[in-house]
Amino acid sequence: MGENFESLKLCNQLCFPLYACSKEIVKRYKPFLDPIDLTYTQYITMMVVWEEKEITVKELGEKLFLDSGTLTPVLKKLEQKGFVTRNRSKDDERNLIINLTDEGEKLREKALSVPENMGGCICLKPDEAKTLYDLLYKILGQME
Amino acid sequence: MGENFESLKLCNQLCFPLYACSKEIVKRYKPFLDPIDLTYTQYITMMVVWEEKEITVKELGEKLFLDSGTLTPVLKKLEQKGFVTRNRSKDDERNLIINLTDEGEKLREKALSVPENMGGCICLKPDEAKTLYDLLYKILGQME
DNA sequence: TGCAATTTAATTGAGTACAATTCATTTAAC
DNA sequence: GTTAAATGAATTGTACTCAATTAAATTGCA
């Protein structure tokens, strides 16, 4: 008698559509991010820096769910492009403080086109989008 | 008067929790995948091969939303581990056919522990999980 | 039949991701 | 005060991910 492999079928996974969906949507961002010369990771990093103006790498990592292995090269790239500065904290030399530059602030205006263009890309009804949003944050919350 | 940058706030994005959630859950798989020596990408690839027994790279790519740039090294690794074979089709030499080996079939039994262990990792009520599943596939469907 | 267009994988290069380790700095314990 | 533990960033190594390009094979049509 054959074993039951139902639990190993792709169509029975919840993680897989999450994984695939994430990648597909990130891919959709590319044509809108290319004109402002940002990748998706650089874009969400800038989102936090635009809001906070000044933030440490550690705080940035907590907000973005990324570690220093990912953020260090991303932030060096953003510094190289002139959108942020990287400086050690005087209080605690272990902390690297990221600051928004004028150039970075200027980029913010141009970046407004991104959500504008992406708007129609996820075709869910407002209540569906809210349900999805809430469920995703519920899961993230449980990941502590 | 200041401009309205609400649309550029991280908390107003739907893509970001999707992206973060996907990564966090994939990360949760690691301790359960390590014992069977598979990465997450290799695992979902094997899921399709376990079901199909024989499939081309193109078909695999369509099912997994991955292109040959990703799949070629993954499949070479799986071949090297002895779980699949890679052979050109006699009918059309452009097609590379992936076949499940006996060793690969054996792995399937061991892999049953993965969904078993992951079971409790996404703590959603059954109806919430179904809602999430349906919404994700709705989005994927629109990506054609 | 002949060859241009199409299809399919593979390759390459840039950019993530993350585990594990290292290094410098700071804090805590004694 | 000196040492031990903890913290934060950087580094290293492995593995994706995708765009763009290349190469081989097949198809379609003039």
Image (cartoon, coloured by chain):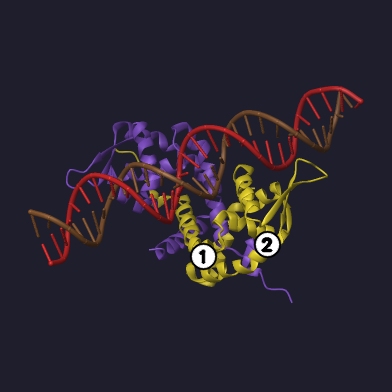
Chain colours: A purple, B yellow, C red, D brown
Residue corresponding to mark 2: B103
Quadrant of the rendering where the N terminus of chain A is positioned: bottom right
Secondary structure under tag 2 reads: helix
Residue closer to the observer: B25 or B3: B25
Residue corresponding to mark 1: B32
Chain of the residue under label 2? B
Q: Is residue A34 above or below residue A68?
A: above
Q: Is residue C6 above or below residue B82?
A: above
Q: Is residue A92 left or right of residue B123?
A: left
First of labels 2, 1 by sequence position: 1
Q: How many marks?
A: 2
Secondary structure under tag 1 reads: helix
Residue B46: x percent and y percent?
64, 58
Q: Is residue A8 left or right of residue A113?
A: right
Tell me which amino acid carries mark 1.
Phe
> What residue is at 47 percent from the left and 31 percent from the top?
A35
Q: Is residue B111 above or below residue B139?
A: below
Q: Is residue A76 left or right of residue B53?
A: left
Residue B7: x percent and y percent?
41, 45
Residue B5 is at least partly visible in this image: no
Residue B34 is at least partly visible in this image: yes
Quadrant of the rendering where the C terminus of chain A is positioned: bottom left
Q: Is residue A7 left or right of residue C8?
A: left
Tell me which amino acid carries mark 2.
Glu
